[in-house]
Image (cartoon, helix red, strand yellow):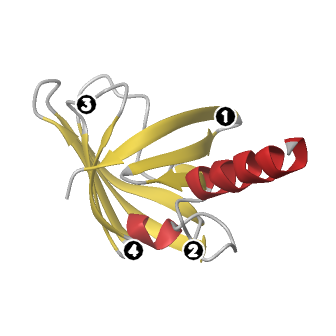
Amino acid sequence: MRLKLLFIAVLLFSFIQFGFSDGKGPACTTVHNGKFKYRDFPSSIIEIKGNKHVEYNKEKNYRIQSTLEWVSDCEYNLTIVKVDAKDMSFAVGDKMNVVITAVNGTSVYYKANYKGNITESVMIKID
């Protein structure tokens, strides 16, 4: 009985962790096109359309445009091509590596590496 409960718990965790994907990893292709917001900063909007990435925040009056190089379905390298903002730490030419670690429904868990600083966070798909 204990073994059966353990098996069910592991199976349930796997479904949640990998977003009911095909078992090869998170259902990352949901990130390739769509509109997102950060869970911790919901006023910032991120739009991804294939190899194009735009992040903007009307409240803080900034807009960052980037290109994406998809390394795999779950990893991309972002290169900033335009920054419309004052007092931003990002500059044209800056690069960031992003790895999607899990997809659970509309929640996209990721790990970003910007200049050696690694951040883990969550984006919510809104469209």
Total number of numbered labels?
4
Helix, strand or loop for disc 2: loop
Which label's residue is closer to the chain start, 1 or 3? 3
Residue named by callout 1: 118
Q: Nearer the viewer, residue 33 or 91?
A: 33
**Residue drawn 64% across and 51% down?**
12
Tell which tag, 2 or 1, sits nearer the viewer: 2
Three-letter amino acid code of the residue under disc 1: Ile
Helix, strand or loop for disc 1: strand
Q: CA distance from mark 2 to mark 1?
A: 20 Å
Three-letter amino acid code of the residue under disc 3: Pro
| Residue 1: x %, y % from top left | 85, 45
**Residue drawn 14% across and 30% down?**
61
Q: Is residue 41 above or below residue 32?
A: above
Q: Are marks 1 and 3 in contact (CB under 8 Å)?
A: no
Residue named by callout 4: 51
Tell which tag, 1 or 3, sits nearer the viewer: 3
Q: Which mark is residue 73?
A: 2
Q: Is residue 91 above or below residue 19?
A: above
**Residue drawn 51% across and 55% down?**
103
Q: Are marks 4 and 3 in contact (CB under 8 Å)?
A: no
The C terminus: image quadrant: bottom left
